[in-house]
Amino acid sequence: MRESKLRIGTAGWSIPAAAAGAFPREGSSLDRYAARLDCAEINSSFHRSHRPDTWRRWASSVPDGFLFSAKLSKEITHERRLVDCGGPLAAALAEMGGMGDRLAVLLVQLPPSLAFEQAVAEAFFAELRSRWDRQVAFEPRHPSWFEPGADALLEGRRIARVAADPARVPAAVEPGGWRGLAYYRLHGSPAVYRSSYDDGRLEAYAKRLAGATVPTWCIFDNTASSAAAGDALKLQRLLASLPRSGGEASLRRARSRRE
């Protein structure tokens, strides 16, 4: 049976009390989370390294079909600012290698102050692509990354630009760069990391995401107020209730296998 191209999850796999009734009662947080949602974004790798055994344990804790994305370390993106990153990049990917094919997407988020420089970007993405051949979701935040030259470079390296909310420039609302992957990061707005999308915006996102024709991830990062899990589950329900075109029917089948 064909898998849905759309995945819905949260940053981390915390289950807040308000959403606990929607998840199984037994098992670890990751066990319970993976019974209802089919992907999770690992953000802790941005702040610190993890032993390969930790990555292997996470991978072995989830059912078939569940996938992870993982955020590249701040040493590479915020401290070295994409320059001379061969050593730390090799170390990070070696650690993550314990996850095997469960790790489907590498997330690269830049600081808002880091502007596009052609030579720096070309060198970094060449180094990255020499070591990592799977999907990459790239979240720049300086306006210069949303110009045609930067977009062309991302497309050429098969780097998908994240669609983010809140958007720092109008173009950030929609996916960019390489269009073989669409990766949405909903951080919460107007209060970043806190605001819920359950104010009518989830319905709009359901219509936008329905019928995805390329691998598409929608990650809720509004975890500070414990809104992420509830928003993810409601978006899942909204998509399942839409008319049965190819994308929605596939999502409905994928969800029914989990319940």
Image (cartoon, rainbow, N blue to C red):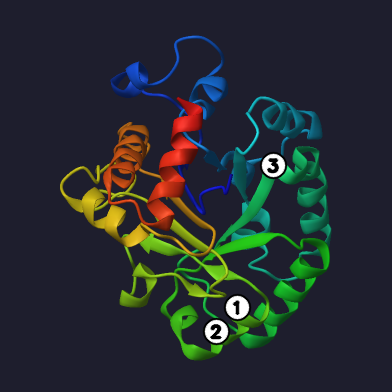
Q: Residue 106 location in percent, x, y?
A: 64, 55
Q: Residue 86 location in percent, x, y?
A: 82, 64
Task: Judge from the rendering whether residue 133 lies leftward or rightward of residue 236; answer left or right.
Answer: right
Task: Judge from the rendering whether residue 171 lies leftward or rightward of residue 27; answer left or right.
Answer: left
- Which residue is at a point 36% across and 76% down the rendered structure image? 171
Image marks 3 and 1: residues in contact by CB distance under 8 Å: no
- Which residue is at a point 52% across and 78% down the rendered structure image? 115
The kind of secondary structure element at disc 3 is helix
Could you say which quadrant of the image residue 251 lies in?
top left
Q: CA distance from mark 3 to mark 1?
A: 24 Å
The answer to whether any part of residue 72 appears in the image is no
Q: Who is closer to the viewer here, 250 or 129?
A: 250
Q: CA distance from mark 3 to mark 2?
A: 29 Å
Mark 3 or mark 2: whose residue is earlier in sequence: 3
Q: Which residue is mark 2?
A: 150
Residue 102: which disc? 3
Looking at numbered disc 3 in the image, what kind of residue is underneath it? Arg
Task: Judge from the rendering whether residue 117 lies leftward or rightward of residue 24; answer left or right.
Answer: right
Q: CA distance from mark 1 to mark 2?
A: 6 Å
Q: Residue 138 location in percent, x, y?
A: 56, 65
